[in-house]
Amino acid sequence: MSKSTDNPSKPSGDRLTTSAGNPIADNQNALSAGPRGPLLLQDYQLIEKLAHQNRERIPERPVHAKGWGAYGTLTISGDISKYTKAKVLQPGARTPLLLRFSTVAGELGAADAERDVRGFAIKFYTEEGNWDLVGNNTPVFFVRDPYKFPDFIHTQKRHPKTNLRSPTAMWDFWSLSPESLHQVTILMSDRGLPTSVRHVNGYGSHTYSLINAAGERVWVKFHFKTQQGHRHWTNAEASAVVGRTRESTQEDLFGAIDMGDFPKWKMQMQIMTDAQAQEWSQRTGWNPFDLTKIWPHADFPVIDVGTLELNRNADNYFAEIEQAAFAPSNIVPGISFSPDKMLQARVFSYADAHRYRLGTHYEALPVNAPRCPVHHYHKDGPMRFFDNNTRNPDAYYEPNSFNGPKEEKRFAEPPLPLHGDADRYNHRDGNDDYTQPGNLFRLFSAEQRQRLFDNIAAAMHGVADEIKRRQVALFAKCDPAYGAGVARALKLDRPGEDRLKGTHAKYEIQNKSAAT
């Protein structure tokens, strides 16, 4: 009786072959001269296996290396057609998507339950091409000028001598960069250590633009509000979780979807016209394109747009999650960019990172490939595993006389007015980086504030007192109770007004000198 009849639920298995399809007779024993060796160079399959193993790991992402993801659907229930012609955002539209969550600082082997920002990157497979919305679980970020992004990331990675994470580097940078206060406050609050990514919000964070059928542009911020509620670990709880498993988020997300408990997020938007942007900026002094600032909901209420649901796990983590490549340069007609400096830089840097990490034609990989026809003039290079203009070999340049792909002027965006002289403007000059984090602090309950103080103190372990005092001075400018609470948690003498003023005067002099 055959094995398949003995156990009909267990497949008999396919024939093992080489990567060229040649059958393999023995996959247990290397080819050698006699039972003790040495090995023979002609054992091509041994060499193939070893050579492939050496290449099984691609470079990890410089940031957002540790990640988790799943497939799902965006369903639009609201009507925002007066703001955008994008088909993916029209009433009743249902669009398949891939959502990848991540931590910013941790390497691939880092524990999931660490205090860190969570990435929230979505690839929408629309009929007009892929739309990638690359954001975080926070509406703001640590820096507003991309010139400082590599410096910030250096503080989150390992010290070049000790090869350890450096709290000194983090807090030294933050204490010299007041624009980081808003994000630091969120990171050190309860929301900086979520129990799982099912229990976090997602934000596009940047300001984008929407364009309607009449060619009118408005500014927009995208929000995804968790329908599972917010849940967070304390530092002590997270330490216990990490002692049990380093994969707590992967276990939670994969397990929930596998059991049919599909997580959902409510998609919302804030809309700002250009006239409102100018009025609001003059009234508040805030730049609507500043990634360290939010648009208060009282000024710009959220609009309910639809629901995002995750309902399918990947079949192969490497192929579908690790090779997933998201880039804010991927937009569709009706959705576009803004003068946000960080967004402008990311439009270049994300795609460039993927070309380095995955290869020249990374967007042809199945997980990144659009679900609509693709026609371009990119040729050759590594990874050209798909059609190389063989169907129309004469049309390998543009313009051409051989019926190659042609531009269509109807997809042109309306012009974006620009003003100002080309210069290196001091992004800290005259900027209010204290009111918004102070407003956030004042929303916290007494218990939430105390956890914030304690979390900051724990994160500052081993940091020099000079840096601690400089950071406390920044917190005090947000709210005196904020600075005093952190000072108590750090067991510092309560900073007096003279010391606070002296610290900030010294910093402002240094900052102006550097700008000059």
Image (cartoon, rainbow, N blue to C red):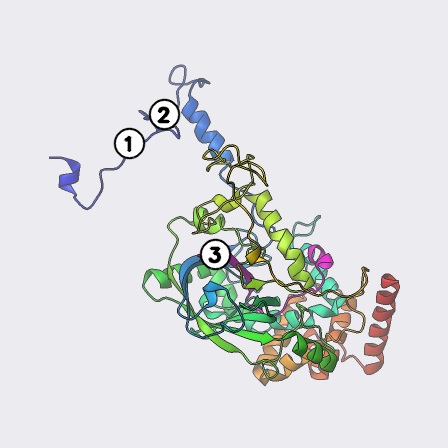
Does the residue at mark 3 contact the one at mark 1 (Cβ under 8 Å)? Answer: no
Which residues are the magenta region?
127-151
Left/right placement of residue 148 relative to residue 243 reads right
Residue indicated by mark 3: 128
Marks 3 and 1: which is nearer the front?
3
Residue 346 sits above or below residue 45 on the image: below
Residue 403 versus residue 351 in the image, above or below: above
- The kind of residue on which mark 3 rests is Glu
Q: Position of residue 163 (x, y in %)?
A: 66, 49
In percent of the image, x 47 and y 44: which residue is there? 365
Q: Residues within 10 Å of mark 1 (few under 14, many from 20)?
A: few
Residue displayed at 85% across by 63% down: 515
Evaluate if marks 3 and 2 touch, with contact meaning CB atoms under 8 Å apart: no
The local crowd at label 3, few if under 14, some if 14 to 19, many if 20 or more residues have their Cα within 10 Å, is some
The quarter of the image holding the C terminus is: bottom right
Q: Earlier in the sequence, mark 3 or mark 1?
A: 1
Front position in the image: 32 or 480: 480
Based on the picture, tell me whether residue 252 belongs to the magenta stretch: no
**Residue bearing the label numbered 1:** 15
Please tell me in which quadrant of the rendered image residue 15 appears.
top left
Reading the image, the residue beneath label 2 is 29
Which of the two discs, 3 and 2, labels the residue nearer the N terminus? 2
Residue drawn where x is 82% and y is 73% of the image: 504
Q: Is residue 355 above or below residue 479?
A: above
Q: CA distance from mark 2 to mark 1?
A: 17 Å
